[in-house]
Image (cartoon, rainbow, N blue to C red):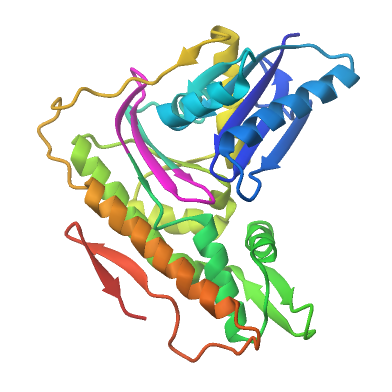
Amino acid sequence: MVLILGVSAGAGGARAVLTHSDQPHMPPIDRIQVPRRAGGSVEESVILAIERMRAAAAQRDEYISGTAVTCRSELQADAIRAAAGQADFAIVDEPLAQLRYLRFTGMLPATDSVLLYDLGCSGLTVTHADCRTDTILASRRSTALSGNGYDALLRWQLARGGISTDAHTSREHRESLSRTAVVTASDADTGGRAVLTRSDLAELCEAGLRDSAEFVRQIIAETGVQPGALALLGGCTRNPSLRADLARLIGLPIVYDPEPEYVSARGAVLLCERKPSARLRMPRRRAGATPVAPRIGQRRLLIAVAITATLGGTIAGLLSNDSARPPEPGTAPSTAQFIDGAPSWKPN
């Protein structure tokens, strides 16, 4: 059988799966995750993932006949190509790979359009796609909601109880809450311990999820097309409480793969088989093809970035205090809430 390497590029690094071209849904022959190094680039992680997987396959006397890499933008695609030099692989638009895999596995319902809700470590990307033509109707990204933000909120909550932890450990706690209902956090310096539950995480995520639901509704209004389902992608959607809350807030049938962070790489495998060594783009609907005026502009996204930076700075200042003094009651980081398209601060 033909072996294909599928790679997805994200802000946090790269993920790769090696599998048979007609079995991307089966447990892969090999897989790897290459985190983005501090100060490094996404394309660096992508190239390193490809090199490591090819070297491992060669040691097993396996031949990889094709490689495909997903990307989120033309800028990212150009950067990956430049870093790769003469390396031969296909570059695929990420939403196209996601749709192809969901269709291949039968998870994509019989609907004219679907919303791809991709929540990763650095932000949320929502893409409204036409399932009949594989066309992007609208796509928006916000950094006001992210896995990194949730990790920071977990550290803040632990700091309230006198437990100091780092970003890596808080991420492990968040990911553990996707598999179990309760985790115990400890402070290596003081020996203190604290219990975290899924309910705690759900409470911390509530404001951000409500904002993202409004984000989704505005994209639907922009396209003027009612989607038939909401596909949850990205590692953050592993949490069952988050999925249940999104289903309630948005009111659409949920499409979910047990390994949502690998959907893009698995879809790349399918597209590489069709057109190796190509650049596969997903067309966008012509501007002006719908009478509905956009309600989300660049200004709002810039404001969201500023809000996230302010939140990160606030928490970083709290956690860098050498005395590890617990924060005063009522000093939780404020969250942004969008009302009628304009940002306002939501008090705690």
Q: Position of residue 151 (x, y in %)?
A: 57, 64
* Depth check, front residue: 338 or 237: 338
Q: Does the rendering let one see residue 23? A: yes
Residue at x 34% of width, y 35% of height: 228
Indicate the quadrant where residue 283 lies. Answer: top left
* Depth check, front residue: 187 or 259: 187
Q: Is residue 53 magenta?
A: no
Q: Position of residue 274 (x, y in %)?
A: 55, 8
Residue at x 59% of width, y 26% of height: 83
From what the image shows, is residue 178 above or below residue 203?
above
Residue at x 57% of width, y 71% of height: 154
Q: Position of residue 299 (x, y in %)?
A: 23, 51
Query: Is 335 situated left or right of 154 in this image?
Result: left
Query: Is 186 situated left or right of 25 in this image?
Result: right
What's the magenta bit mostly, secondary-structure-wise? Answer: strand
The C terminus, quarter of image: bottom left
Indicate the quadrant where residue 1 lies. Answer: top right
Query: Is 57 situated left or right of 9 in this image?
Result: right
Q: Does the rendering let one see residue 109? A: no
Query: Is 150 situated left or right of 258 in this image?
Result: left
Indicate the quadrant where residue 20 lies. Answer: top right
Residue at x 84% of width, y 25% of height: 56
> Which residues, given as a range, are shown in magenta?
118-139
Q: Is residue 120 magenta?
A: yes
Q: Residue furthest left?
A: 291
